[in-house]
Amino acid sequence: MNTRILTAALLAAAPATPALAQTAPELAGGNGNEGIVVTALRTPLAVERISSNVTVLDEDAIVALQPVAVTDALLRTPGISLSRNGGYGTTTSLRIRGADAGQSVMVIDGMRISDPSSTAGGYGFSNLFTDDIDRIEILRGPQSILWGSDAIGGVVNVRTRRPTRPLEGSFALEAGTYDTVSARAGIGGTSEAIDWRLAGSHFTTRGISARANGTEADGFTRSSGSGTVTVRVAPGVSLDLRGYWSTSDNDFDGFSGDTRAYGLTEEWSGYAGLNFELFDGRLVNRVAVLQTETDRENYDPTRTIRQIDFDAHGRLRRYEYQGTFTASEMVQAVFGAEREEQRMTTASPSDSTAPYTLSPNSVDTNSVYGELRVMPLAGLTLNGGARYSDQSRFGGNTVLSAGAVYTPNEGATVFRASYSEGYKAPSLYQMFSIYGVDDLSPEKAKGWEVGAEHAFGEALKLSATWFQRDTDNLIDFAYCPTSGAQPEVCYIPGTQTTRFGYYANVRAAKARGLELAAAGRLGVFFAEGNYSWIKAEDRTEGSSTYGRQLQRVPRHLANAEAGIDLPQGLRASVAARYSGESFNAATGTAKLDDYWLVDLRAQWQVMEGLIVQGRVENLTDKDYETVAGYGTLGRTVTLGLRSRF
């Protein structure tokens, strides 16, 4: 029997089993290490059986990177760019292969996280820190077959730590520039009957001015907690309970500069799932319910009344069934059904003295999906799947996928090819805000990629991927005429009040590019890097911006790191990150300059389970922008301790 198929089947039958770790050189974006198992496809699967490009950062890689936010780690991988309106805690937009910020799916411990009350309905990465995370997976390309709406750019799947001993704990404490302090701790244990872990964190910083022309610092404070419990009720039956919570307080500036405004955000997610096996373990079932809620309030303390400037509540509830059937060592099927209920409530006063008006809106989606994987020949895996979704607003939608991956030498060399489709349903805000249109159609994407990688033992790993993605029906803001008679769409629905614009399906885009990665080691010396060329263009027929690079999508991205890793437990490196120039907005000529950022990182394992770390970020104190007019962090020095016991 092929051992990799057997391993994947056993892991699917035991969802509490930790996935095997990936070595630090995988940071460069290559794959091919034996034993690497990926869960972003909703069931554990050996990496050499995945037809899409995937990067896995395990705990060792994350510890070596020393990231504060998850986005700090994601930026070191191929094809990912970011824009942020100031320091930590401000609006953060992540783009995978040039896809818009709302076109990627975020998953924490199997819970899909999003905010239905946000403009695009996706996840805001500003409040996601590394906390108790020990694994990050980035699955690129349209992935709507298994993940439904929004999975056009890709999927970011993170997992918190799982216990491996009867009782264990961990903590991390660091402090640095801008009066920044970060503290994290966790405790857990495992036994024959139960696995459990609880963790918490707190982060605070004086910060920098959000606006580049500001004179006062805009601070940020965040606290979070997470917990997982797996109870083995009977042979082949287990119960999973998971939870995640965070609350934050961030200052921000207005378009003209300093303000006293601040925002409060609270997020929480809960998951309850029952796993059970049938037919001697060949059919593994999961029945689950999960809920995510986000509350956002913006305050302006300069007002004597109506200090709440904005108030929004988003709730997402999902009911899920998933089955994994291993018919033989060569055939495996994943299938399921889901119901997703999105709710958005916003509150705003009609004038400075009127009571706040609550505006609730909702949309529901029912879906069925299935994907089949077969291994007709040793080393060759074929996959194909489909999803049908029916949304209460726009009706039915079907997406398809197919792929092949071949390894002639048990993972040392891997060839990949895949075709996949994705879609993004219009958000509640785009349909029901004062700028909304309730009959919007979903955005649709079709993409394909081919790639190859090869490992020369542990000395050198190389990989290359070419991708292309075409997206139609993109939702954009359309402006109303500034004079003359107004069309019906330029009135707020149900009123005689005009508006200056509305959302409409008016755009198309095409992205294609090349991702290259390499990682090498010679004795105690190591080096790794990646380069991405992304040509993401507006393809809206008749538009003045036809053929123009999409806003805030650099055409060139690169990462490099080189250093020394001594057996005495000392690791030190120099890392550099490059972002090419980009347009600041969809129209206009203003551009964001290209820049290089250089970091120094070092860590020393003083004793087993105790590491001393330090880093200098933006060593040259480079002045740069990811959004025109907004500040970025200068030279930052941080020292800390990290322990597992």
Image (spheres, rainbow, N blue to C red):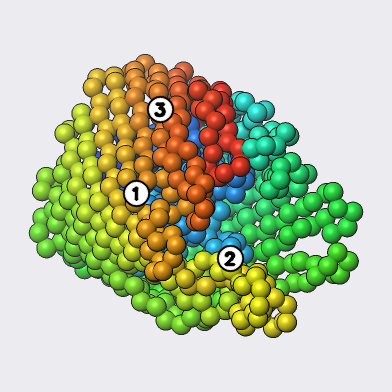
Left or right of residue 327: residue 597 = right
* Quadrant of res 165: top left
Q: Nearer the viewer, mark 3 or mark 1?
A: 1
Alpha carbon distance from label 1 to label 2: 29 Å
State the separation of the CA atoms marked 3 and 1: 22 Å
Q: Residue placed farthest to the front in the image?
A: 484
Q: Percent from the top left, x then y, of residue 423?
A: 41, 69
Identify which residue, 186 or 587, lies in the foreground: 587
Q: Residue at x 48, y 72 (%)?
A: 505
Q: Amino acid at mark 3?
A: Ala
Residue drawn at 32 percent across, 33 percent down:
529
* Vertical order, 50 against 611 (above or below): below
Q: Which residue is mark 2?
A: 116
Give the percent coordinates (x, y) of residue 455: 18, 37
Q: Residues within 10 Å of mark 1 (few under 14, many from 20)?
A: many
Residue that numbered label 1 is attached to: 534
Residue flagged by tag 1: what amino acid is it?
Ile
Contact, mark 3 vs mark 2 (Cβ under 8 Å) = no
Tell me where residue 196 appears, x and y as whole percent: 51, 48
Asked if one can make out residue 592 in the rendered structure from this viewpoint, the answer is: yes
- Residue at the image position 68 percent from the left and 57 percent from the top: 296
